[in-house]
Amino acid sequence: MSNTTTPATASADSYAMTELNREAQMGGMGTETTDREVRRISLADFEQRRAQIADELWSAATDIGFFQIVDHGIDMAEVNHAFEMSAKFFELPREVKEQFPLKKGQNAGWEFSSQVRPSVGTPDQKESYQLTLPRMDGLWPTEEELAGFRATLLDFEHKCWKLAMDILGCFAEKLGFDREFFTRAHDPSTETYQSTLRLLHYYAFPDAMLDEPNVWRAGAHTDFDALTLLFQRAGQGGLQVLPGAEASTQAWTPVEPSDEAITCNIGDMLMRWSDDKLPSNFHRVRAPRRGEYTGPRYTIAYFAQANTDALIESAAGKYPAITGGDYIAQRIAANFAK
């Protein structure tokens, strides 16, 4: 096999390094502001209101890349049950969870303080479990270890996929693509599917660390998917976004968690696909402060990531074409400890 780097590969590598270098500059404390609004958009009567909803999604996404959706069709009982299963998984003895180790470069399995953000250079203070459908052989707890876990997550993953495709379908039409463009690129029926459902458990915060500067539950980063759906619990805050207009001053906007709203954000894949019309902005999870909730923080994230064989090619040619598989591989390699 030749070791020669082709011009296309070199361009893609250069693009990835630009993103990572940009992230590495985001480790400072910055300031906080409430001047920016994270808009809340109702998806009620989706098909009947599709054009209006698409306009509202586009307006919010092109502003700060973050928005929250309500009336989204996933029943609150199902959301609560998914969180219950998540908590039960993370309560399993460590020796049980270690039977399902994160597969290198595969976004599947359990990891423990292994994600290192280039912005801060230290591991995020959390553990997580990744579900990527074609890669789960040997990574499921048995029914004896955790009854109902597999069935619950598979059902929840499918509902998240459907919701993400509805939203991406709106963006597709706004970008001049056909409605099913992104659905074809995120096909769960094939072995190339690499969208991921991720359960996250941020550890209870020790009192001794409350006054430490530059300590984060998750350092500043952008997501490297197309679209993220984030389920949060009321009272378990800390998520902040840095809109592009505030990047030079690092004025971070808090994203208030609630049980009924799903927080959504544009990822690097979609920013690239849209020739930067849709911004993928930095976000982080700051440490709690004295007087705030310091217990464990649980979230569930669905990352819509184009299939490994899908070609991410910007319409105007601003960025070199790259497959979804190569793109995700580059980003995983830069964000997880060796």
Image: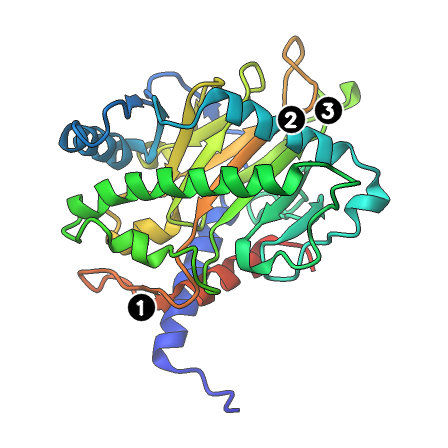
Q: Residues within 10 Å of mark 1 (few under 14, many from 20)?
A: some
Q: Amino acid at mark 1?
A: Ala
User: Measured from the top left, where is residue 131 in percent x and y?
Assistant: 58, 48
- The answer for how far apart the CA atoms under marks 3 and 1 are is 42 Å
Towards the viewer: 234 or 13: 234
Q: Secondary structure at mark 3?
A: loop
Image disc number at residue 337: none
Towards the viewer: 208 or 320: 320
Q: Dot 3 corresponds to which residue?
A: 204
Comes first in the chain, label 3 or label 1: 3
The single residue placed furthest to the bottom in the displayed view is: 1
Q: Amino acid at mark 2?
A: Glu
- The answer for how far apart the CA atoms under marks 3 and 2 are is 17 Å
Q: Dot 2 corresponds to which residue?
A: 84
User: Measured from the top left, where is residue 177 in percent x and y?
Assistant: 17, 53
Image disc number at residue 321: 1
Q: Which image quarter is the C terminus in?
A: bottom right
Q: Residue at x 44, y 63 (%)?
A: 190
Q: Residues within 10 Å of mark 3 (few under 14, many from 20)?
A: some
Closer to viewer: mark 1 or mark 2: 2
Question: Measured along the vertical axis of the image, is residue 303 above or below residue 311?
Answer: above
Comes first in the chain, label 3 or label 2: 2
